[in-house]
Image (cartoon, grey):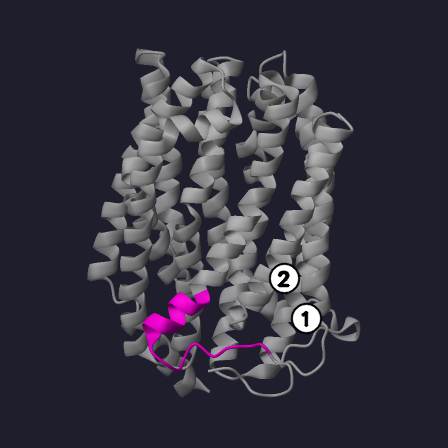
Amino acid sequence: MKVSAGHRTEVHMTEGDPRRVIVAFALPILLSQLFQQLYSTADTWIVGHFRGTEALAAVSSSGSLTFLMISFFVGTSMGAGVVISRYFGAREYEKTSRAVHTTVLLSLIMGVFLTAFGVVMTPILLRWMGTDPDVLPQSIIYFRYIFLGSIPMVMYNSLRGIMSAVGDSRRPLYYLILSSMLNILLDALFVGVFRWGVWAAAVATALSQAVSAILCLVQLMKKGNVYTLSAAKMRIDGVLVKEILRNGLPSGVQNSVIAIANVLVQTNINSFGKLAMAACGAYSKIEGFAFLPITSFSMALTTFIGQNLGAKEYDRARRGARFGLTMGVAMAELIGVAVFVLAPLMIRTFDPNPEVVAIGTQQARIEAPFYCLLALSHCVSGVCRGCGKASVPMYIMLSVWCVFRIIYITVAMHVRHVIWLLFCAYPLTWFISSVAFVIYYLKSDWVHGFERKTDAANHIR
């Protein structure tokens, strides 16, 4: 399965048992996502433990804002992964190399833009979101420092996506484990020992993310790989940029509209005060861990489908898709049951305040039983991206997770201003999107359409 030449680490997912290939690829992604989640969780836990509820609320107040700013660029970089995996699966290594170099330079430009935009707009956006005045000064400081670390954050996600697209999901894991441990140590040192403010937690995160990005960059620059990164080859290929954006923009837009809806949710959470902000912030970190098998199998499916369709292994792509969907949904539901049962204990580890624990537990027990629906939507999205139909999940997410969710929240909060109605927005929209995705998956020609398109392109050549 591996390309055997020197220290090459690329893996062809067009060979071997699809189930084993997908699991072997998804597990390192799962573990890397686990350690990446530790970044923000360490910030939240250490700040809450050493600085109190108000500081915890400041860090938690606008996690959706950070996701909004970053998600578009990360989603767009997914398009690069699809393009690279397609060329790699077809063994078109010259195009693979050009796509890699274009992606790296494009990501650097995106990181610079995000840094400037985030630093300037943070105070305005936080005020628009109705952040509690008691925590607003600390929130501004924290998120400005977070955005100052945008370049390493965007670059790491882009470089990891490149390595995953060619089947190397293990090395990004090793690098992330190292940087996650560094982040925890720096958090403990800056906040716990030196007693610096919430800004220090953001600095620790940025420094640690930079370490993982540099390690990925060094690996990509090693000679002997078909995609070896070289400064001399670093340029924007216009044709490939169009292809990357065609596959990536729908994912970027999809992520952004979801984030916009989540910003509205956070704005309504902020209206319930700092205890609700702290509680929901703590739960969001727990939920972040629950999402890990969902995102890992979704990413594995995108690469698997992309490589196998590129190699014209259509039946193999179908079998892999069925297995990935089943595993993602089953694992997510098992974790959902665990979160439902253990929610009070988990929330208490972030903040022992009884009101914070009660609100966080209520949110967990409304949302956790329906993680299977969230997994189904994300995994079918992964299949769609892999077969070049990224616009399908974009339209579904835009209409359901953004438009419908916003309408529901607006009406519900107008009828009755109680927080549990706000929490219901998530399982309700997960259910509707899952129904839409199942109908599409069962009735569409997502594989055969690609086969016909590819055959037609070959005929034109």
Residue designated by label 1: 220
Identify the secondary structure beneath mark 1. helix
Name the kind of residue labelled 2 in the image. Leu
The front one of 67 and 290 is: 290
Determine whether 11 is above or below 365 in the image. below
Residue designated by label 2: 159
Q: Earlier in the sequence, mark 1 or mark 2?
A: 2
Identify the secondary structure beneath mark 2. helix
Q: Are marks 1 and 2 in contact (CB under 8 Å)?
A: yes
Q: Residue at x 50, y 28 (%)?
A: 349
Q: Is residue 277 magenta?
A: no
Q: Is residue 10 magenta?
A: yes
Horizontal side of residue 61 vs 121, given as left or right: left
C-alpha separation, residue under disc 1 versus residue under disc 2: 8 Å
Q: Position of residue 27 (x, y in %)?
A: 44, 61
Q: Residue at x 24, y 62 (%)?
A: 444
Q: Residue at x 42, y 61 (%)?
A: 385
Mark sitting on residue 54: none
- Quadrant in which residue 222 is drawn: bottom right
Determine whether 408 is above or below 168 in the image. above
Q: Position of residue 433 (x, y in %)?
A: 29, 44
Residue range in magenta is 9-25
Q: Residue at x 26, y 40 (%)?
A: 432
Determine whether 58 is above or below 100 in the image. above
Horizontal side of residue 52 vs 313, given as left or right: right
Name the kind of residue labelled 1 in the image. Leu
